[in-house]
Image (cartoon, coloured by chain):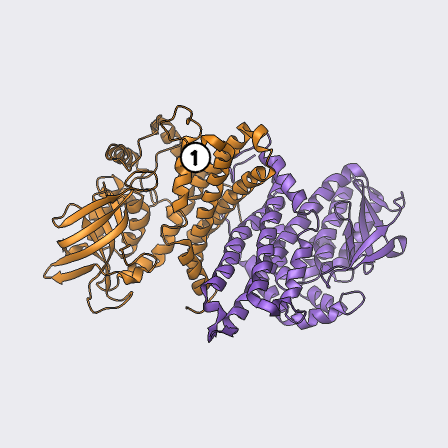
Chain colours: A orange, B purple
């Protein structure tokens, strides 16, 4: 055990810091859930890619830096430290890419990954359907093979980024007689194909962060299939699935929030200390953010040494989503009457980012597999308890 | 950056795990409760055979010279099997004090009495032939004082060495039947003093932190044991025609415990590393470890008894051994109030290092 950075790692950090200092936009970008903001964020992805920072863990030939997981953590720390923009293409870079690396053909990797890294292709997710939320194996949207094309009919919903994104990935039922997680296939498709209708869904903040996607005889080349036909469930759930969980939320994001929360508390201490439970919540927030960082470093160290990541990764999502709620709830308690103010209010300068984060924190325990589903996974796959 | 243990460290942990599974079965521990000392010479001899009493005794005194990182994995096992206090107090805490006295002597800074004491007792500890009780003002009571061959006691920051006959003991029965707590009355004198306050201050601080890591690691082991007991029970006990562990309400109790343990473990292990490397924030890391592990153990107790139903409220079910031990240890060597205050002091200090790059920042 050695809990110090190597000279090489320190040099890498310095390199990231230097680039971020020079390139991170001084003014915050508009939300990527608007057309204008989406394009601002896409331009930022292109800029990141010019510096070869958009997908540091990818192999060099695909536009990455072949960083190991420790270097990835260092990169993320510097990224969040610099206050850089949210990643509009995280569905692609963090969620789809690990699966593409594991199951994609060389042709598919070359076709999709460099454009993804450059922000030329931005990605939406296509998992949930009206009748398939937590019960994802109930997917009904059909993809019927017809020569060298699939013909897709049905509906996806809660598709994150689908309003402005270029591409979508998800699971489709290719065997009409199949049940549950059999007969599903993982397919990638452009969202501008004939027969696709996208209906934006307003989120809690009033912006269309996700959408319904309707498929009416949409023709998708069979070459867009990822992995074997009928194996889509396994492709989606494979080892990469656990790694996705790791990549989706690096600890740096929460450590940055915890740091901001401590600063907020310090500024309002005279008032906040009248309720001692505030101080306690701030303390717990910081300790839990540290614990998440330590846990991730431990997992990353194991991965660097050739270990693998298993179903215990389901604990991550529960931990960070509850931590994020705790931090934002605590901030709102400190902010009192200012908490409710919309960003355009003249008195909202300090509070508006907290309100934004508070709203988004409400979604944390729900998306990417609700925390109830994660608890079932832990109980069944880590503890070995029987299925219902 | 490498947050992993060596193959040797893990192999030793695995060996101790297997050994304790056989030698420290719950029914055996219950038998020891009934004895007056609460301790078994036979078990201690077997632990010594495994090298546990020699683990951190310096090689010059017949030990293995291993450190805090080796201990932290072993302490998790001691917790998992609810091994009573005396082993950690003697082989880890007392050895820390005695080794410190030996080091001071070798630097020509200690009292002659300190050197003699270390040279006499360290080999005996390594060989498994001594029980040493340790106490200072942080704890109102001293564990295993009546049963000790030697007591190392704090007076202000001085270290005093006493024989049991030199102290008056009043037994304070604990809810944890494996504990043997005593209120001590004794008179410090120049004849009992083995280290002055100036030299003793860092020794006691190091001891408090080592006790903290030992307890945090034991609480982790206890939490895991209570989780395992609850899981086993939920898989076997049937109601409504199926195992209660197939119901989500029960599953989620146990999943919540799993989450708490997962995120306490690295905090505890980092604290051990910080001690081993004299990290300037070691004490803060230890207190974080105590709070995280305490939370995991308390939740494990609460959820496991809930899953056990009425059976969990009985004397018969083994859960009680681990639950009561967790409740007791959680307040030993600084309770949660003490440890939270230490973390708060560091966190809210001017210039505290916070933020995404602070976790492993050099100080």
Quadrant in the picture for residue A354: top left
Image point (79%, 69%), residue name: B35
Out of A340 and A387, give the one closest to the viewer: A340
Say which chain tag 1 marks: A
Q: Residue furthest bottom?
A: B241
* Horizontal arrangement in the rendering, residue B39 relative to residue A339 (left or right): right
Crowd band around label 1 with a 10 angstrom C-alpha radius: few (<14), some (14–19), many (20+): many
Residue A132 on image: x %, y %: 29, 58
A327 and A258: which one is in front?
Answer: A327
Q: Is residue B67 visible?
A: no
Question: In the image, is residue A15 above or below residue A149?
Answer: above
Report the residue marked by disc 1. A354
Question: Left or right: A147 with respect to B219?
Answer: left
Residue at the location (60% across, 56% down)? B297
Label 1 element class: helix
Whether B112 is drawn above or below A307: the answer is above
Whole-percent x and y of residue B247? 46, 66
């Amino acid at each position: 055990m050695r809990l110090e950075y190597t000279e090489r790692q320190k040099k890498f950090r310095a390199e990231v810091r230097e680039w971020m200092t020079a390139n991170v936009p001084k003014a915050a970008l508009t939300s990527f859930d608007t057309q204008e903001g989406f394009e601002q964020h896409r331009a930022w992805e292109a800029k990141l890619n010019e510096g070869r920072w958009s997908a540091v863990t990818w192999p060099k030939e695909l536009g990455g830096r072949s960083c190991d997981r420790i270097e990835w953590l260092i990169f993320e720390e510097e990224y969040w430290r610099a206050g850089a923009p949210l990643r509009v293409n995280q569905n692609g870079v963090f969620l789809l890419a690990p699966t593409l690396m594991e199951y994609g053909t060389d042709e598919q990797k070359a076709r999709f990954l460099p454009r993804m890294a450059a922000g030329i292709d931005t990605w939406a997710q296509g998992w949930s359907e009206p009748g398939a939320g937590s019960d994802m194996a109930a997917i009904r949207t059909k993809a019927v093979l017809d020569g060298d094309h699939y013909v897709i009919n049905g509906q996806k919903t809660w598709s994150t980024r689908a309003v402005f994104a270029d591409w979508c990935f998800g699971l489709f039922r290719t065997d009409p007689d199949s049940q549950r997680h059999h007969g599903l296939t993982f397919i990638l498709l452009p969202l501008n194909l004939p027969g696709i209708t996208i209906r934006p869904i307003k989120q809690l903040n009033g912006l269309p962060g996700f959408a319904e996607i309707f498929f009416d005889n949409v023709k998708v080349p069979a070459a867009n299939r990822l992995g074997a036909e009928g194996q889509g469930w396994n492709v989606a759930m494979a080892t990469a699935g656990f790694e996705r969980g790791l990549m989706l939320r690096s600890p740096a994001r929460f450590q940055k929030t915890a740091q901001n929360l401590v600063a907020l508390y310090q500024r309002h201490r005279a008032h906040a200390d009248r309720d001692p439970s505030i101080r306690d919540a701030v303390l717990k927030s910081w300790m839990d953010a540290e614990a998440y960082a330590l846990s991730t470093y431990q997992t990353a160290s194991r991965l660097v040494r050739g270990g693998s990541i298993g179903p215990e990764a389901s604990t991550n999502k529960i931990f960070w989503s509850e931590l994020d709620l705790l931090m934002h709830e605590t901030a709102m308690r400190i902010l009192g009457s200012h908490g409710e103010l919309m960003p355009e209010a003249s008195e909202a300068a300090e509070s508006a980012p907290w309100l934004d984060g508070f709203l988004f924190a409400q979604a944390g325990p729900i998306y990417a597999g609700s925390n109830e589903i994660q608890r079932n996974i832990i109980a069944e796959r880590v503890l070995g308890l029987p299925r219902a | 950056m490498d947050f992993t243990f060596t193959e040797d460290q893990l192999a030793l942990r695995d060996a101790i795990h297997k050994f304790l599974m056989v030698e420290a079965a719950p029914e055996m521990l219950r038998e020891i409760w009934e004895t007056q000392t609460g301790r078994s010479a036979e078990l201690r001899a077997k632990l010594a055979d495994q090298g546990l009493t020699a683990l951190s005794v310096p090689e010059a005194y017949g030990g293995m010279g291993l450190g805090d990182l080796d201990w932290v994995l072993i302490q998790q096992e001691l917790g998992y099997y609810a091994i009573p206090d005396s082993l950690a107090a003697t082989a880890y805490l007392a050895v820390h004090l005695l080794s410190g006295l030996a080091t001071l002597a070798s630097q020509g800074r200690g009292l002659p009495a300190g050197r003699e004491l270390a040279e006499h007792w360290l080999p005996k500890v390594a060989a498994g032939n001594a029980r040493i009780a340790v106490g200072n003002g942080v704890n109102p009571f001293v564990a295993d004082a009546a049963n000790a061959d030697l007591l190392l006691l704090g007076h202000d920051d001085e270290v005093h060495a006493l024989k049991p006959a030199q102290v008056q003991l009043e037994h304070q029965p604990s809810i944890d039947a494996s504990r043997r707590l005593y209120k001590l009355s004794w008179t410090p004198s120049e004849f009992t003093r083995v280290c002055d306050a100036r030299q003793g201050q860092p020794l006691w601080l190091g001891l408090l932190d080592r006790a903290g890591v030992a307890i945090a690691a034991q609480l982790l082991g206890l939490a895991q044991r209570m989780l395992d007991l609850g899981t086993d029970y939920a898989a076997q006990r049937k109601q409504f025609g199926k195992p209660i562990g197939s119901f989500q309400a029960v599953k989620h109790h146990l999943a919540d415990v799993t989450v708490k343990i997962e995120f306490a473990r690295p905090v505890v292990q980092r604290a051990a590393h910080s001690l081993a490397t004299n990290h300037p924030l070691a004490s803060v890391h230890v207190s974080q470890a105590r709070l995280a592990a305490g939370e995991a153990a308390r939740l494990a107790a609460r959820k496991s008894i809930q899953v056990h139903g009425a059976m969990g409220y009985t004397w018969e079910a083994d859960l009680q051994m681990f639950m009561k031990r967790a409740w007791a240890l959680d307040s030993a060597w600084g309770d949660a109030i003490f440890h939270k205050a230490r973390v708060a002091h560091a966190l809210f200090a001017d210039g505290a290092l916070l933020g995404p790059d602070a976790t492993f920042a050099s100080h």
